[in-house]
Image (tube, rainbow, N blue to C red):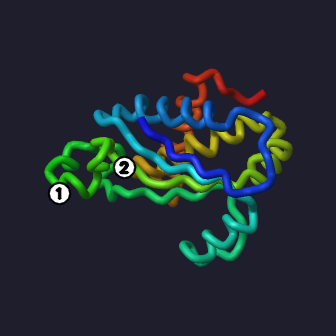
Amino acid sequence: MTINFEYETEIKLNLDYETIINQVVEMASDYEECPYEIEVSVVLTDNESIRQINAENRQIDQPTDVLSFPMIDYEEPANFTWIEEEEPDYYFNPDSGELVLGDIVISVEKVMEQAEKYGHSQKRELAFLTAHSMLHLFGYDHMVDEERVVMEEKQNEILNKLGIVRE
């Protein structure tokens, strides 16, 4: 598993964000029974930068907590059966052989704001946003209630398996 980190803000989280994100990414991959080693890129940024990315990519000109940019267009969430039938270099890093899932962008400011707002730790908020984004990278969405319920259940199960619960 490879996680490429970029920390693009002066605002510092007072926690070991790399370890937390690594644990959540690995647990999400195991939970979804991904049969491949994976590669994910994670950018930690501030509200202004994520606002710009959100405006450019989703035409929503406001900061958000997390953005997910999946590289795979799944026929159904977390179904990997067809991937090897495609052009091999399209989904796999030719150097490492890892399945490239996509990119995660997290606002450090939102981690801090939402942890305080919801009354839990920054660790829990960062882990939650990472789990949420990983599920998007595996093809899940939450545009309708039925999908939202599935995602919420999976997010909670991933975090519970790691012992990261609301405090």
**Other residues around mark 1 within 10 Å, as few (<14) / some (14–19) / many (≥20):** few
- Pinpoint residue 96: horizontal percent, then vertical percent: 31, 42
Q: Secondary structure at mark 2?
A: strand
For label 2, the crowd category at 10 Å Cα-Cα, with few meaning under 14, some 14 to 19 and many 20 or more, is: many
- Amino acid beneath label 2: Val
Left or right: residue 97 compared with residue 123: left
The reply, left or right, for residue 88 in relation to residue 165 is: left
Q: Which residue is mark 1?
A: 87
- Along the line of sight, the residue nearer the viewer: 148 or 112: 112
Left or right: 99, with 128 as reference point = left
Task: Tell me the element at label 1.
Answer: loop
| Residue for point 69% across, 67% down | 49
Residue that mark 2 sits on: 100
At label 1, which amino acid type do we have?
A: Glu
Residue 74 image point, x, y percent: 31, 54
Alpha carbon separation for disc pair 1 and 2:
13 Å
Which residue is at a point 41% across and 35% down the rendered structure image? 1
**Residue 132: which numbered mark, if any?**
none
Q: Is residue 152 above or below residue 19?
A: below
Image coordinates for residue 56, horizontal then vertical, percent:
58, 77
Q: Is residue 141 left or right of residue 62?
A: left
Q: How many marks?
A: 2
Residue 90 at what x, y percent from top left? 25, 58
Mark 1 / mark 2, whichever is N-terminal = 1
